Structures are given as C-alpha cells and as structure tokens.
Amino acid sequence: MGESKKQFEDFRVKGCVCAPFTLLKDDGEINFDGFEDYAKYLVSQKFTYLFVNGTLAEGLSLTLEERKQTAEAWVKVAKGRFGIILHIGTNNYKDSQELACRKIGVDAIACFAPSFYKPDSLETLVEYISKVASAAPNTPFFYYCINFFTGVYLNDAKFLELAESKIPNLVGLKHSSRELPNAHRCMMVNPKKFQVMIGSDVQLLTSLSLGIEVPVIASFLGQLFDNMKTAFDKVDMKTASKYQCQAQEINTIRSEFGAGINVAKAMFNIVSGLNAGPVRLPLTDLSQEQKQKLKEKIDSTGIFK
C-alpha cells in the first residue's frame, strides 16, 4: 500500500496536453487511417500528453465500443511520443467502470460528473467518482470539472478534501471551469498530492502565474503555448503576453461563429491542413460559406503563418 501511495504522489503530468478531436469520415464513422498523420502533427505542436475521448473529441457522442477502439488507436500511435490520459466519463458509473478497467496501457484516467441525473451534493459526487475510480485502483485518476457542460456546480476544492481519503488513486483534477479562483483554491489542497491542470485557452498566462503549468488545449495551440511558456520561464512577460493575446484573438474569432466544438474542429482543419472531418449529430457543421469566412479571419491574424 505504501508503494502504491508513493506511486500516485510521484505521478505528475508535464508539458502540454492536447485534447484531440475524433477523426470522422463524411458518413460519421471514425477515420482510424488518419491517426498517424494526426499524431505527427501533434508532435510538431510540442504536445507531451493526449487527453483522449474528452469534450473536443465528442466523447459522449461515441458508443462504448467506439470509445474503446479510439482509445486503443491513440495508445498505438502515441507510443514513444505522448502519455495518455483517457477520459471515461459517461452518464452512468457502470459504463465508466467498463472503460476504466481495460488494461490498454494508458498513463491515467479521468472522469467528469454525470450531466443528466446530477449529483446533488459533494458527498454524492465523491461516492460516484469513487465507484468509477475503484475500477482501476492502480491507475492515476483525475476528476474532470467542466461545470458549464455538466451543470454540476459544486466546490471542487471541497471535493478534493472529501475525496482524498476515499479515492486512493486520485491525483488531481482537470479544471475546465471558467472560474479561475476556483482552480487556485484547488491548488491549495495538498499540493504535494494533487495536480491541477487548466482547460481554458484564454487563461493560460494567468494560470502560469498562479503556478498551474499544465494546460489541456486544442490541437492547434500547442506551439503557441510552448512559446508562451518559454517566454514566461525567462520572465519575458512582454513576449508571454503577446502569445496570450494571440490565444485570446483566436478565441474571439471562434466565438464569432458560435464557439462550439464544430467551430474548433473547423479551425483545426484550416490551421493544420489535415482533415478531421465533420462533427457528429446532434452537433452540426459550419456551412461552406461560414468555413470560408472563418478561414479569412484566421489568415488575417497571421498567427499560424
């Protein structure tokens, strides 16, 4: 037990985490043939970890079997390139346990709160997440807070405090909530044990200043963050701020077209030169006219030249 505890205390994600899209064909089926080229692009973007089957991946629009296949595909192409954090969140703990217990070589797993039948208290949330995490007791586990999607607005710092003694493999949380003070409070809960990762493109530099060094971001922002982090480490705040302004500019453009996953995926297709395909219903793609306008706005920034 002592060795296991030390294993979890020593686990730390380092570098920059990509939340990859799920590559889809025009008919909505997964395009596994494109994973290798996608992985090469992510290497060029300086990513060190992948957060697989999360929100940008439309994880909840995939079947359990598709999520298993996608996880295996990413593990295969990630070997020697990236660590893997596998998101296993669903709307029932049984399915999440099924995804969690598969031994396919991931480095960590993560799960968010169910979003239809919602936990109504911290105690209930801890009990639910504990059931999920217990399916893979030897795998580091992150709680994934994305309250504006799940509708579960509970105190994440209190969650860590309550969960510490109940979820032995809990190593931290991915904080995609828009309330940065909440992330800061989480950092104060046993920082030797718990790691906080930020999931907001517009809070990267502010997060660095608070000591949150690992972001989980879209596929086309890795190089931008790497440049920002390099400048930040040199205490070159003018340059670091320039890159944060660029991230904000990209986010502003995205917001003009609705700010959804469909927009982010269209941006990736434009910026990377790869084809991640469409989004899956009930999400809908941008029209060709919208995609052209989006491309013109992106090109006008000069950020990705």
Image (cartoon, rainbow, N blue to C red):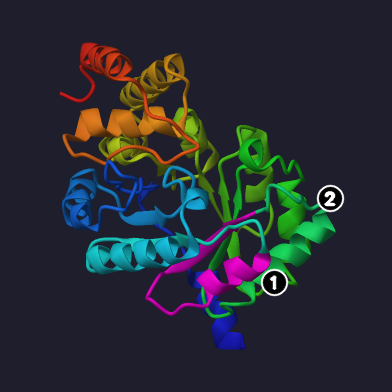
Residue 131 circle label: 1
Residue found 54% across the figure and 80% down from its top: 138
How packed mark 2 is, by other alpha carbons closer than 10 Å (few <14, some 14-19, many 20 or more), is few
- Quadrant location of residue 84? bottom left
Q: Earlier in the sequence, mark 1 or mark 2?
A: 2
Q: Nearer the viewer, residue 11 or 74?
A: 74
Residue 23's x, y, as percent?
30, 48
- Check the image and report above or below for 143 versus 186: below
- Check the image and report above or below for 117 versus 83: above
Residue 220's x, y, as percent?
29, 36
How packed mark 1 is, by other alpha carbons closer than 10 Å (few <14, some 14-19, many 20 or more), is some
Q: Nearer the viewer, residue 116 or 173?
A: 116
Name the residue that disc number 2 marks. Answer: 120
Residue 300's x, y, as percent?
23, 11
- Quadrant location of residue 284? top left
Residue type, label 1: Lys
Q: Nearer the viewer, residue 138 or 253?
A: 253
Q: Nearer the viewer, residue 47 or 112?
A: 112
Question: Is 108 one of the magenta-colored residues?
Answer: yes
Question: Is 166 one of the magenta-colored residues?
Answer: no
Left/right of residue 43 with respect to residue 143 in the rendered view: left
